[in-house]
Image (cartoon, rainbow, N blue to C red):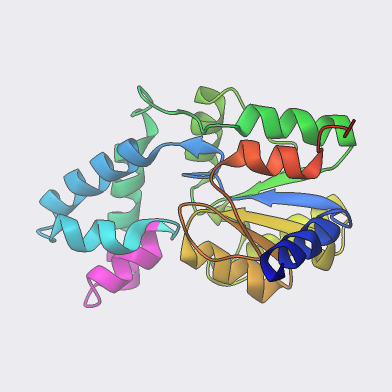
Amino acid sequence: MAASTCEEGVLMELAGIGAVLFDMDGTLVDSDAAVERAWERWAGEYTVDPAAALAIAHGSSADRTIRRLLPALDDDAVATAAARQLALQYDDLSDVTATPGAHELLNVLARLGLPWAVVTSADARLAEARLDAAGIKAPVLVTVEDVTVGKPDPEGYLRAATLLGVPVARCLVVEDAEVGLRAGRAAGAMTAALKGLDGDLRLHDLAQLARQLDPPPTS
């Protein structure tokens, strides 16, 4: 009974959602393999343990990850290393696709008239390339170039909510990385978590969220 009550409470909160704010990689776009290939190549060039890089890279900006991996680098060296890491990703789109349920969910948002945005730790060039490969056109896109501090800082999600004209407390942040969920919580948004992570709502895939936002009529 308690679980049912909890689920009903979440669905009631979803009814008040005014906008959806998506992470990109691993959430709307399945680019995990491309991301891993780029970090593995970069790690080889910079003599870094690839496993250590992959353990902390997901959901974070390249420069933030590099500062953690190579704390002795100065700002210019970090910028050069981050530019190289991104360069390894720009043209690696062969297996980049939309995640399961992504297009179904976006169609539901269009039908319901709910605005949405993408907030990503990628730069604009990479974000647009991956979204295009997945057949997704974001009405509002906030990239690492639009913020002074990346996730887990809430700046990106707060900016997206402002651009959409929706109070962040009425936004749902959809994420597949803990660093992004922390950003969503810090912004004051409701969170939906993929990949077994813990949010206000836990999702198997985006099709589940589509059904919860727009449930089929009961007979």
Q: Main secondary structure of the magenta part?
A: helix
Percent of width and height locating residue 92: 33, 29
Q: Is residue 60 left or right of residue 209?
A: left
Q: Residue at x 24, y 60 (%)?
A: 53
User: Quadrant where the N terminus lies?
Assistant: bottom right
Q: Is residue 6 left or right of residue 192?
A: right
Query: In the image as oriented, which residue stretches furthest toward the front?
Result: 1
Q: Is residue 213 left or right of residue 145?
A: right
Q: Which residues are magenta?
A: 62-77
Say if residue 83 shows up in the picture.
yes
Image quarter for residue 36? Answer: top left
Q: How many marks?
A: 0
User: Quadrant where the C terminus lies?
Assistant: top right
Percent of width and height locating residue 200: 66, 65
Say if residue 137 shows up in the picture.
no
Percent of width and height locating residue 170: 84, 62
- In depth, the one of 41 and 199 nearer the eye is 199
Q: Residue at x 52, y 52 (%)?
A: 194
Q: With respect to residue 183, does 127 lie above or below?
A: above
- In depth, the one of 129 and 29 nearer the eye is 29
Q: Residue at x 88, y 32 (%)?
A: 217
Question: Is residue 64 part of the magenta span, yes or no?
Answer: yes
Question: Is residue 140 part of the magenta span, yes or no?
Answer: no
Percent of width and height locating residue 122: 48, 48
Q: Residue at x 33, y 43 (%)?
A: 35
- In depth, the one of 126 and 29 nearer the eye is 29
